[in-house]
Image: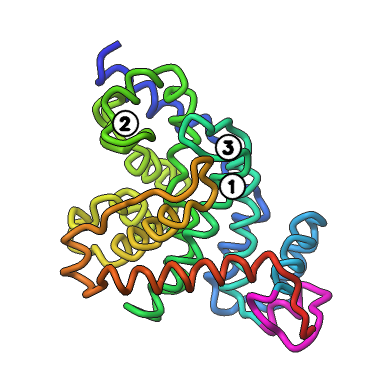
Amino acid sequence: MSNNALVNQILQDIHDIPPLPEIATRVMQLTNDPDVSAAELNKVISQDEALTANLLKLCNSSYYGLPRVISSVTQAIMYLGFQTVRNMVLATAMENLYQREDLSVYGYTPHGLSEHSFATAVASQVVSKKLRPGLGDTAFTAGLLHAVGRIVLAKYAREHETKLREVSEADYITSQAEKEVFGADYAEIGAKIADNWNFPQELILAIGYHLDPEEAKGRPLLAVIVYLGNVVCQRLGVGLIEGPREIPLSDYCTEATGVSEEDMKSLCEEVHENVRLTAEPNPKA
């Protein structure tokens, strides 16, 4: 099968990806409405017991360090705000989606893509606070979705694993190898999925160009932020079977942001601590 035929088949498979759960979609719509109330948001989220439980678990983690135990969605909204609650809901929805595919061919552990994507979301938010604080919530969402394309490519990667490994210039399957074998890499496929889900253009661009931020059509900052968040989590080895990967920092991102290798070491330490705190109960509550 030619590259053109293969990429066309892959693009067709995007339409088989299930939409986000109705509750997650509704929450995203509501949190974009400046007139929505906490009671309305609570009513939607509380319909899903598992979602509510995951939300409250994260709220009561050491990461947020709230002064009391959060026992309801309304309290979570009051203490953390609409956008943070939205991000938690989306993270839960994506966790379920990421665990549907066997992604070991890409070097992920059984829950690896979910863990890596959540860590990249946290890392992107950390980077955003340093470069453009107002982009924090959007950066979290973009980081969470940056590798969504691999849930479509996974079955093709298993079928073409030998060829992918032959052309990869690393001991794991690279995006350059995906382009050579499939005609598109996971970032491009992820952007198509985000477009299919009717996400905003800035998110689609960030997902599609986070591997090459300089190509992001005049709006590279969010793509740069997600690029840095992803590099941090690759270097930390979050969700990866073989552990940390030595990913070099691109000259473009260094020049565009002033982030140095020394800064990256500090970012890795900060993100590692933040991710650890999300998994620990809050001792102060």
> In terms of secondary structure, where does tag 2 sit?
helix
Mark 3 crowd level (few <14, some 14–19, many ≥20, 10 Å Cα): few
Mark 1 crowd level (few <14, some 14–19, many ≥20, 10 Å Cα): some
Name which residue lies at 23% across and 73% down: 257
- Which residue is farthest bottom? 67
Quadrant the C terminus occupies: bottom right
Mark pair 3, 1: CA separation? 7 Å
Check contact, mark 3 vs mark 1: CB within 8 A.
no
Q: Earlier in the sequence, mark 1 or mark 2?
A: 1
Check contact, mark 1 vs mark 2: CB within 8 A.
no
Name which residue lies at 45% across and 71% down: 125
x and y percent of residue 202 in the render? 34, 61
Quadrant the N terminus occupies: top left
Q: Which residue is mark 3?
A: 18
> In terms of secondary structure, where does tag 3 sit?
loop
Q: Is residue 231 magenta?
A: no
Instruction: Name the residue type under label 2.
Output: Glu
Q: Which residue is mark 2?
A: 178
> In terms of secondary structure, where does tag 1 sit?
loop
Question: Residue 171 is drawn in which quadrant?
Answer: top left
x and y percent of residue 261 in the render? 28, 68
Check contact, mark 2 vs mark 3: CB within 8 A.
no
Q: Earlier in the sequence, mark 2 or mark 3?
A: 3
In this picture, is 216 found above or below 256? above
What is the number of the mark on residue 20? Answer: 1
Instruction: Name the residue type under label 1.
Output: Leu
Segment tinted magenta in the rendering:
62-79
